[in-house]
Image (spheres, rainbow, N blue to C red):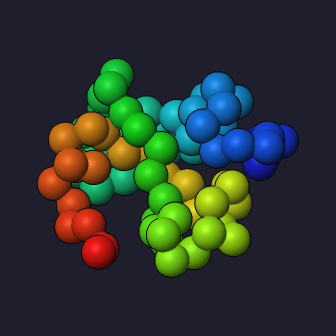
């Protein structure tokens, strides 16, 4: 069930992503306690999707730092 929220960095969003992704990073699929909320479509170019739950993914800090950044 999609959580009701106004900002993507709310605790309810983090909890829902953790559950939906089985506490595993969507890139490396490892379980992690240190995770971040990632936007599949970058905020810079897709501002209208910034708070869309379908655009949010559970990612570990390591993978988030390693993935390519779009300039």
- Residue 19 visible in the displayed image: no
- Classify 31 as above or below 29: above
Q: In this view, does 32 lie to the left or right of 11?
A: left
Instruction: Please state which of residues 19 and 36 is positioned toward the viewer in this rendering.
Output: 36
* Quarter of the figure with residue 17: top right
Q: Is residue 10 left or right of residue 40?
A: right
* Quarter of the figure with residue 50: bottom right
Which residue is rendered at x = 21% and y = 48% of the image? 65
Residue 8 in picture, x, y percent from top left: 64, 44
Which residue is rendered at x = 37% and y = 33% of the image? 35
Residue 41 in picture, x, y percent from top left: 49, 71
Instruction: Please state which of residues 17 and 36 is positioned toward the viewer in this rendering.
Output: 36
Instruction: Please state which of residues 35 and 48 is positioned toward the viewer in this rendering.
Output: 48
Number of marks: 0
Residue 1 in picture, x, y percent from top left: 78, 46
- Residue 30 visible in the displayed image: yes
- Classify 34 as above or below 70: above
Q: In this view, does 7 lie to the left or right of 64?
A: right
Which residue is rendered at x = 64% and y = 26% of the image? 11
Instruction: Please state which of residues 47 and 40 is positioned toward the viewer in this rendering.
Output: 47
Looking at the image, which residue sits at the far right?
Answer: 4
Looking at the image, which residue sits at the far top?
Answer: 33
Q: Is residue 15 left or right of residue 71?
A: right
Q: If the image is split into quadrants, where does the C terminus sit?
A: bottom left
Which residue is rendered at x = 55% and y = 55% of the image? 56
């Amino acid at each position: 069930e999609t959580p009701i929220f106004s900002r993507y960095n709310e605790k309810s969003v983090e909890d829902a992503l953790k559950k939906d992704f089985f506490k595993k990073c969507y890139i490396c699929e490892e379980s992690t306690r240190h995770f971040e909320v990632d936007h599949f479509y970058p905020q810079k170019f897709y501002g209208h999707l910034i708070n869309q739950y379908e655009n949010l993914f559970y990612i570990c800090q390591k993978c988030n730092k390693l993935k390519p950044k779009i300039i």
